[in-house]
Image (cartoon, helix red, strand yellow):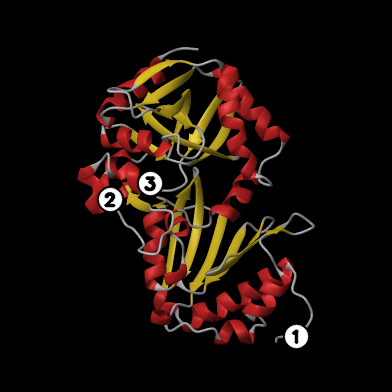
Amino acid sequence: MTTGPPLYCRDAFELFSVAFERLAQEFGAQLTDVDIALAGRRVRARILGAELGRMFLEAFELSPGGGQPALEIWLWDESPDTGIDARVRLECGLDEQALRASVVTGVSESGRYVCNAAQSWLNFLDLERSRIVGCVLSRAGLGIHERARPFEWPLRFWLRRLGLPVVHAGLVASDGAGVLIAGPAGAGKSTVALACVDGGLDYLADDKVGLEAVGAGAYVGHRLYRSILASVDVLDRFPHLVSHARRRDDDEEAKAILMVSELYPRRVARSCRIEAIVLPRLDAGLTAPRLERARRAEAATRIFPNCLPLYPTWDRDDFVRLADLVQSVPVFWLEVGGPPAALPALIESAARRSP
């Protein structure tokens, strides 16, 4: 068993940074070095490993132009097909067993470092340097959530530091007017988001949105990823999309990834103002979906519990901000039933109504 002094988040971050720079020199031919757009910010991504770089670029959008990045991501792939073995990591003092014995997923006591010790990858965020560094131990072991939404855990902390808390909700838009789709897991958020982009509306999210206050009672929602992570029963309502779904045979959650950027490249928006909130409820007995006004108190009880699991990236100020949004825009129940093709018109109707 490996022995030695314990590693702290700070130590792991520094050692991973050194290891990445050594690997970038040795395996430079496999380096993907690009700027991506994330919640309206420029992020510099340096990914070692061709297949991991491809997977990363599918999830995020390239950022045009130049300028100083707001965040750096340094990541390498130790999967067998890369030829990048664990030698350099071990030489830098980063033994996996010792790391897992010392560091767990969470936040350092200082609040500066965020650690993510997942089964198939290790990554560390320094909030003051605005850099995430880490490695994928086995690309084949990445879960479907990690493939569809890379770095969700550390990115939530980084976005929160920028004043952009991540909300558990979907978001679609028509002519820049956005409708937040809020509710618990299984309420129909992915069904509504998928129906809307399939019906011609712009897509921003099916599950996680960056929320930004831009004025008194005015809010903008930012897209984080370009994918929809839908359950198999949702896909059953969109048979023309089944062949495009990506699944893992060992996925116990029966989820599939749809890359919106491939299916609807012109319908992927970066951000939009939020003009309304809909609260979907699945009702198999309906022959057609139905939109009706909801009380703001109903919206609060429907939305707020879903944000509790976002702790510790949420605090009191974020709940106050969300409560202000609920008070500032019209809120509707959306009874989801019948053909999904009827949903986009209802969402457009919600976006056009004044408080």
Q: Residue flagged by tag 1: what amino acid is it?
A: Thr
Residue 21 in the image, given as x and y percentages of width and height: 56, 76
Q: Name the N-terminal-most of marks 2 and 1.
A: 1
Q: How crowded is the residue under tag 1: few (<14 C-alpha within 10 Å), some, or many (20+)?
A: few
Q: Nearer the viewer, mark 2 or mark 1?
A: 1
- Per the image, label 2 sits on a secondary structure element best described as helix
- Which of the pair 326/223 is nearer the observer? 326
Find disc 1 in the rendering and name its residue: 3
Find disc 3 in the rendering and name its residue: 230
The reply to whether dot 1 and dot 3 touch (C-beta < 8 Å) is no
Please name the residue shown 59% across and 62% down the image.
132
- Per the image, label 3 sits on a secondary structure element best described as strand
The reply to whether dot 2 and dot 3 touch (C-beta < 8 Å) is no
Please name the residue shown 32% across and 57% down the image.
246
**C-alpha gap between disc 1 and disc 3:** 44 Å
Find disc 2 in the rendering and name its residue: 262
- Which of the pair 319/341 is nearer the observer? 341
Please name the residue shown 63% across and 50% down the image.
157
- Which of the pair 259/39 is nearer the observer? 259
Q: Quadrant of residue 129?
A: bottom right
Residue 284 vertical placement versus 42 (above, below) = above
Q: Residue flagged by tag 3: what amino acid is it?
A: Ala
Q: Is residue 215 left or right of residue 316?
A: left
Q: Residue flagged by tag 2: what amino acid is it?
A: Glu
Q: Name the N-terminal-most of marks 1 and 3.
A: 1
Q: Name the N-terminal-most of marks 2 and 3.
A: 3
